[in-house]
Amino acid sequence: MESIPKVPDTCGQVCFTPPMPPLAPDGVGALGILAGLRRNAYSAFPPRCREQPVLVLPMLGRDVVIAAGPQAMRDVLATRPGLYRRIAAGDRIFGALIGRGVAASEGEAWRRQRRILAPAFTPRTVTLLAPHMAACTEAALGPLEASRGEPLDLLGVMQDLSLAVACTSMFSLETKAFGPQLRDMLHFYADGIGRPRASDFILPGWLPTLTTFRRSRFRRRWRALILAIIARRRASHSAGAPRDLFDLLSDAYGDRDEDLLADEVSTMIFAGHETTGLTLFWACYLLANAPDWRRAVRREARQVDLSPVGAGSAAGALPHTRAVVEEALRLYPPAYMTARQAVADHELCGVPVRRGAIVLMPFTLLHTDPRLWVSPERFDPGRFLGPEKPDRYSFLPFGAGPRVCMGAQLATSEAVLVLARLLRDNDLVLDEDGPVLPVGAFATRPNRSPAFRLLPCA
């Protein structure tokens, strides 16, 4: 394995070590791994997948390649992306939600969509959208702070808040009318038919199954809801109002491709609800078990202006809060894995890879590799604060290369601002005992939603 400096441990003996599911037994083969992805990606891969940067496992005449090392991921995602394509399983699993959106397209269509969306995800855009993030956060936290001490479903709160931020900042829409239905449908999909099946990876994309039928039926309902949201947005947006992401998309696609416009809107809503909401939940869970880091975030948050007026500059002035968010992304990356299919015979880190092979890249293994991280099992945001930063390809919560997540900076800044505002005036504690384990199935969700309490703090 290539030599990459470890990120040092900075917390001594006071760090919280969150519970994690055990890895799969070492004898598990390709079919066992694929079947395990439906239950939990955190426990689907055996230790040897981490010990070897590239592991080839035969399966029914086709190879499954586990590429868990940083050099292998760099080669697949960034250095030689032309040797790979998106796998059909991705369309099966996510197609019902995002259709032909930018996250699912390829080739010239993908390049065109990426060019259209790029202006909406610049650093300047983050600054412009920060006031919307701050206003949504104030609106969400107001009722919670008025009922401090009561049990709180923080997972639901954070997902609702992230959905509100996405709809308000990107589409100039409030979520009162359709927010509950969006949330219920996303939860229904993520907890059931959205979970990967072994058949998603094994069967050809054109072959229907009971699951694909159920996903198609879901897609019709989901599409009807998205089209209703688009119609409401068009009817409610007055002439001369500030332009937003929807205007950018509507100008590009207009009436010529209403389906693609709906797919892009779906992609943004899905990403806002799942990625940022889950990141905030996990950051809160970790902080509830780490009082020293709660105090560090609070001290920092009280030194900046987190109001809608000052939020644009505050996001870059919260290094400890950002480190907490990054450490949550390391331990619980919302997108726990990515995958590609080889389009030609070649070598990956010196290992032969055949055309048609499925290449799985589990970020869960990369982010907890003891050869890359000191005490990787510990919650230690300090590893992101010191002079020795993580190697670029040892920390990939948003992927890498040409298809890196366009909204990475936006999602991270939103999480930083929300977390700082939450901890500025409140203490956060768990209201119950027992482990909370990550379940990597559709995204990295908790195995249960524990109750929290907000308490006043001096």
Image: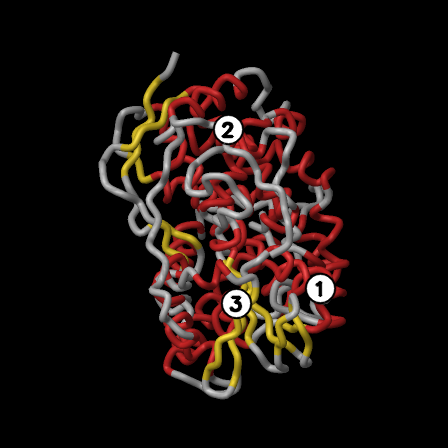
Q: Is residue 406 above or below residue 194?
A: above
Q: Secondary structure at mark 1?
A: loop
Compare residues 278 and 74 and report the one nearer the observer. 74
Residue under pointer 1: 254
Residue 413 visible in image? yes
Residue farthest to the left? Answer: 433
Query: How far apart in space, not on screen, are marks 2 and 3 (Cα)?
Result: 31 Å
Residue 312 position in % (x across, y down):
66, 29
Question: Residue at 54% of width from left, 39% of height from top?
Answer: 326
Crowding around mark 3 (Cα neighbors within 10 Å: few <14, some 14 to 19, many 20+) is many
Residue 177 position in % (x across, y down):
44, 49
Residue under pointer 3: 66
Question: Residue at 49% of width from left, 59% of height from top?
Answer: 51
Residue under pointer 2: 10
Compare residues 148 and 428 and report the one nearer the observer. 428
Residue farthest to the top? Answer: 458
Q: Secondary structure at mark 3?
A: strand
Q: Earlier in the sequence, mark 2 or mark 3?
A: 2
**Residue 454, label in figure:** none
Crowding around mark 2 (Cα neighbors within 10 Å: few <14, some 14 to 19, many 20+) is some
Q: Secondary structure at mark 2?
A: loop
Q: Is residue 245 above or below residue 114?
A: above
Q: Is the C terminus in the top left, top right, bottom left or bottom right quadrant?
A: top left
Q: Amino acid at mark 3?
A: Ile
